[in-house]
Image: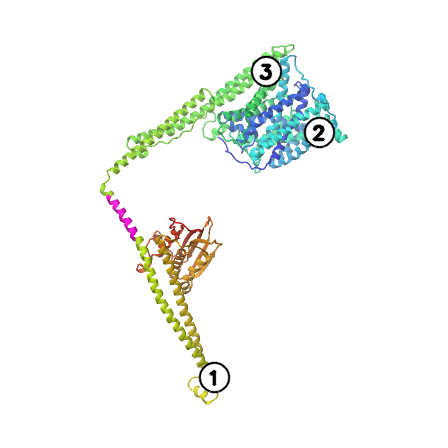
């Protein structure tokens, strides 16, 4: 059970930060050179031949690099490098194989962390803190780098960029300065001598393989850049760039620098403390400060070697935990996505190794597991190319490089068998124990998962039985090896002892293969077959039996079986693989039978339906055809009636226009008479005013009955009233005439609609909307209705202007009538805007605060002739409006929450309303 699947990581790293973190692998060449040249502790040196061995290790890493890049980018959301990616790559073969690869890889880096911290601490105490304990300073360095990592990967990357900048600059100077100053003895740099433990070809092979075995540490300079794929921005682009940049730096450290240093300080100088012996490579430029530069070079390079395992390698544990291959605790992350448990465990292990002195035999045992961690990914790439060629590969390794990577893995395996033996039996046993520790953690995780699932923690497992048997074989083999070696006198028989040791190492490696890998593959295939059998028994086969019973009873509806075919993936090419293929064939045959049953059921249903149809009364078919003909006839009548109604309406409106013209003439005559009366009234006003002020007898005579001031007031009011009456009458007639003209245009448009014509023009939407409001202006003013306009930025529209005007007039008229019947804050909101979801359409919304529409009437308001008016009057407005909208490839919808809650009509038209679609709809 996997705790989390593809849990994402924040991508914060660029290729430069990834490359800087990977340089912690290149720097390991610095402390390998001394061990290879003169030897340390129990390991024999290889002399100056250590330099070609470094070059061979470099070449092997270059051979594996393209395949590693292809592998990690197949799962670009993961962290932990090539070994952690094997958790997915080996899942179809054996999950425990991914666990073995990842844990072995992690163990291989642990001594590096402690050893580089010790070397850095030694330089610091020698120059800055004399008298302070070196292990104490080394532990403090590890704690400091742990704290930096806990702040997040970006902090670690920025720290690595600074350290890498200093160390790379000093490395280039250490290579360039001696060449420019002429201090390189090129003859000495090209002279190589191999020290052997005993004479003969077998002694030379043993010595070379022992050196090559340690040179496996050249690979970290290449693969460390793969530890942060899931945290790198644009990994498909940046990860290959980072890996090849790291490989270039590795070439500097493992090829250029060793050759130049050999030519400057010789084999003896390479075997001494490089912090002091590398001074001559800097002296031509720095003078007396050359020794300080050498110490700084060593110190910054060792800083890198301490930082890299805590940053990248620790993520291998967290990724394997998320894959369900290690205990869940290892996967815990902080809010900054830092796998803090894995980092702390890595630091604790490094400090433990540091405190016991990081002896050479411990480094050799760790290197045994590291070689497993870098060899198996090359095998994984090869298997994926062979078994899953169609799988997506964002980066594809060039032709032939997958085979080269497999060859490199084989060479690393041979160097382990032939070179591992000289470190002694305890070292071999420790290496095996480190490799098997992953299997113990895997078993613990499975035990916990089973307990969570409510089943016994330990089950009967073929894998457990085979692995237990192999462990017993390994113990017996170790005992036999010990007795054999003890019984042989090493003096004079060193080749024989060496051969026995090599045989034991080979058997130990086979034990890992037979005890972990093969049982895991067999058990995985068996589990997959068991799961498929259970799915088949409880799924397709059970459904198939029920379907056959239903078919026998004539229940065709239940005579079906689901096809649940999940092929068994078994990659082993043996009897287990053949069993999986046979089981897949069985599943396919059952699936075909289930599909055949479905075909038979459908055939029976079709035959039954056809029989029922043939037995149907022929008279019913005639009735159905008659109904179809009557419906078609009614449609023709309705269409003809619509066209006729348009003609009649034109005639009626023409007659109304004639009458209105006559009335208009009468109104003009009335206007003339009113003007004459007004003129006379004005003259009388003047006379009355004069009389009012006259002191003659005539004035007094007139004032006897009528006062002059009263007469003036009367005539003035009369004139004003006459003006108002005249203006109102003329305005009413003008409005009526305009309304009739508009209606004639609309009816003419309807007539064109019935004939299939379209009067298309380009016009302004605001003007048309305002015109519709003006047509209804009298009623709006009469009822005191507030008009709220919401006009957005609108394009010019190509459409039938008169059809659109008809729709808007009808909708506004309906809204006016609705709000006038309610008499409570009458308001009509008219909104015109571009459709926010489609810029090629325009939307009108006419919303009122009127009486609303009942729910039972919502489904009928667009029907021809439907009306809620008394006496059956009206009923054509909404129907004709919907037809007009349909004509212009638009739609008209109505919304209302019921009586007393107002209504809203939505008209949608395309900006280029030329064409016909059926778009009338009603929404409640």
Q: Nearer the viewer, residue 230 or 770?
A: 770
Instruction: Work out whether residue 392 or residue 94 is closer to the camera in this orientation and state it.
Output: 392
**Secondary structure state at the residue bearing disc 1:** helix
Mark 2–mark 1 contact, CB under 8 Å?
Answer: no
The residue to which callout 2 is attached is: 176
Q: Position of residue 876 (x, y in %)?
A: 34, 56
Q: Earlier in the sequence, mark 2 or mark 1?
A: 2
Q: Quick check: 1 above or below 662?
A: above
Asked whether, in this view, residue 209 is left or right of residue 624, the answer is right
Image coloring type: rainbow
Q: Nearer the viewer, mark 3 or mark 2?
A: 2
Helix, strand or loop for disc 3: helix
Question: Residue 409, relative to residue 292: is it above or below?
Answer: above
Percent of width and height locating residue 662: 36, 69
Q: Residues within 10 Å of mark 1 (few under 14, many from 20)?
A: few
Q: Nearer the viewer, residue 779 or 362?
A: 779
Indicate which disc, 3 or 1, sits on the residue closer to the N terminus: 3
Dot in front, 3 or 1: 1
**Residue 416 appears anywhere in the view:** yes
Q: Position of residue 678 (x, y in %)?
A: 43, 77
Task: Report whether 601 appears left or right of 88.
Answer: left
Which portion, as a residue range, is magenta?
A: 622-637
**Element on which disc 2 rests:** helix
Distance CA(mark 2)–CA(mark 1): 126 Å
Quarter assignment of residue 605: top left
Residue 533 on the magenta segment:
no
Give the residue at mark 3: 502
Which residue in the structure is indicated by mark 1?
690
Residue at mark 3 to residue at mark 1: CA–CA distance: 148 Å
From the image, give the main secondary structure of the stretch colored magenta. Answer: helix
């Amino acid at each position: 059970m996997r705790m989390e699947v593809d849990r994402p990581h924040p991508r914060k790293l660029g290729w430069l930060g990834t490359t800087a973190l990977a340089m912690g692998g290149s720097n390991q060449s610095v402390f390998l050179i001394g061990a290879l040249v003169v030897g340390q502790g129990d390991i024999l040196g290889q002399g100056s031949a250590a330099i070609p061995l470094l070059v061979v290790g470099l070449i092997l890493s270059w051979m594996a690099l393209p395949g590693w890049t292809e592998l990690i980018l197949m799962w670009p959301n993961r962290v932990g490098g090539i070994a952690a990616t094997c958790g997915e790559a080996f899942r179809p073969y054996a999950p425990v194989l991914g666990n073995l690869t990842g844990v072995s890889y992690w163990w291989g880096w642990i001594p590096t962390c402690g050893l580089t911290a010790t070397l850095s601490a030694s330089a610091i105490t020698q120059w800055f803190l004399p008298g302070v304990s070196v292990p104490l300073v080394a532990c403090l360095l590890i704690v400091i780098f742990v704290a930096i990592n806990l702040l997040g990967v970006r902090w670690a990357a920025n720290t690595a960029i600074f350290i890498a900048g200093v160390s790379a600059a000093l490395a280039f100077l250490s290579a360039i300065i001696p060449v420019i100053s002429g201090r390189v003895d090129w003859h000495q740099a090209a002279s190589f001598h191999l020290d052997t433990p005993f004479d003969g070809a077998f002694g030379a092979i043993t010595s070379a393989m022992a050196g090559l075995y340690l040179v496996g540490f050249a690979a970290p300079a290449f693969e460390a850049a793969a530890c942060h794929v899931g945290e790198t921005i644009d990994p498909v682009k940046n990860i290959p760039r980072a890996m090849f940049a790291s490989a270039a730096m590795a070439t500097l450290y493992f090829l250029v620098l060793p050759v130049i240093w050999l030519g400057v300080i010789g084999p003896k100088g390479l075997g001494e403390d490089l912090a002091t012996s590398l001074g001559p490579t800097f002296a031509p430029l720095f003078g007396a400060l050359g020794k300080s530069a050498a110490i700084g070079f060593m110190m910054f390079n060792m800083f890198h070697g301490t930082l890299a395992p805590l940053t990248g390698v620790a993520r291998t544990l967290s990724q394997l935990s998320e894959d369900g291959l290690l205990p869940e605790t290892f996967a815990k992350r902080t809010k900054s996505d830092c796998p803090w448990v894995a980092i702390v465990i890595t630091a604790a292990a490094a400090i433990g190794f540091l405190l016991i002195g990081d002896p050479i035999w411990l480094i050799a045992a760790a290197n045994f597991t590291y070689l497993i961690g870098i060899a198996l990914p090359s095998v994984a790439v090869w298997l994926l190319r062979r078994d899953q060629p169609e799988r997506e590969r964002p980066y594809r390794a060039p032709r032939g490089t997958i085979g080269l990577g497999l060859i490199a893995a084989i060479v690393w395996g041979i160097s382990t068998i032939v070179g591992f033996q000289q470190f002694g039996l305890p070292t071999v046993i420790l290496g095996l124990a480190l490799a098997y520790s992953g299997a113990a953690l895997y078993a613990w995780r499975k035990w916990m998962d089973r307990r969570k699932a409510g089943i016994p923690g330990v089950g009967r497992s073929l894998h457990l039985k085979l692995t237990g048997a192999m462990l017993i074989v390994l113990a017996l083999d170790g005992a036999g090896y010990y007795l054999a070696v003890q019984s042989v006198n090493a003096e004079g028989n060193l080749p024989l002892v060496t051969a026995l040791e090599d045989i034991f190492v080979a058997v130990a490696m086979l034990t890992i293969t037979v005890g972990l890998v093969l049982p895991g593959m067999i058990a995985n295939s068996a589990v997959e077959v068991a799961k498929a059998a259970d799915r088949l028994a409880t799924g397709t086969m059970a459904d198939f039996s029920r379907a056959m019973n239903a078919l026998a009873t004539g229940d065709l509806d239940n005579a079906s079986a689901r096809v649940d075919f999940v092929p068994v993936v078994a990659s082993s090419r043996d009897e287990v693989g053949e069993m999986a293929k046979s089981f897949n064939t069985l599943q396919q045959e059952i699936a075909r039978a289930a599909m055949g049953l479905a075909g038979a059921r459908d055939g029976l249903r079709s035959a039954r339906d056809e029989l029922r149809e043939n037995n149907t009364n022929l008279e019913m078919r005639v009735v159905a055809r008659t109904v179809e003909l009557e419906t078609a006839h009614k449609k023709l009548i309705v269409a003809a009636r619509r066209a006729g109604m348009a003609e009649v309406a034109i005639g009626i409106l023409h007659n109304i226009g004639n009458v209105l013209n006559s009335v208009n003439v009468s109104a003009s005559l009335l206007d003339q008479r009113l003007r004459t009366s007004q003129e006379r009234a004005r003259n009388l006003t003047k006379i009355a005013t004069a009389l009012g002020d006259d002191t003659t007898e005539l004035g007094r005579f007139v004032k006897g009955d009528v006062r002059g001031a009263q007469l003036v007031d009367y005539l003035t009011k009369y004139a004003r009233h006459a003006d108002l009456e005249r203006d109102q009458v003329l305005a009413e007639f003008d409005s009526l005439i305009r309304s009739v003209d508009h209606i004639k245009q609309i009816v003419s448009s309807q007539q064109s609609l019935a004939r299939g014509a379209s009067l298309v023009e380009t016009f302004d939407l605001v003007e048309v909307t305002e015109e519709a409001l003006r047509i209804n202006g009298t009623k709006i003013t009469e009822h005191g209705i507030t008009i709220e306009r919401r006009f957005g930025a609108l394009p010019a529209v190509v459409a039938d202007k008169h059809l659109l005007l008809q729709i808007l007039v009808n909708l506004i008229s309906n809204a006016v009538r609705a709000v006038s019947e309610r008499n409570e804050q009458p308001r009509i909101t008219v909104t015109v805007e571009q459709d926010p979801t489609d810029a090629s359409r325009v939307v009108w919304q006419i919303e009122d605060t009127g009486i609303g529409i009942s729910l039972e009437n919502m489904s009928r308001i667009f029907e021809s002739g439907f009306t809620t008016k008394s006496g059956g009057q009206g009923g054509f407005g909404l129907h004709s409006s919907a037809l007009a909208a349909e004509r212009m490839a638009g739609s008209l919808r109505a919304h209302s929450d019921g009586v007393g809650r107002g209504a809203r009509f939505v008209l949608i038209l395309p900006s280029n309303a030329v064409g016909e679609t059926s778009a009338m709809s009603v929404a409640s």
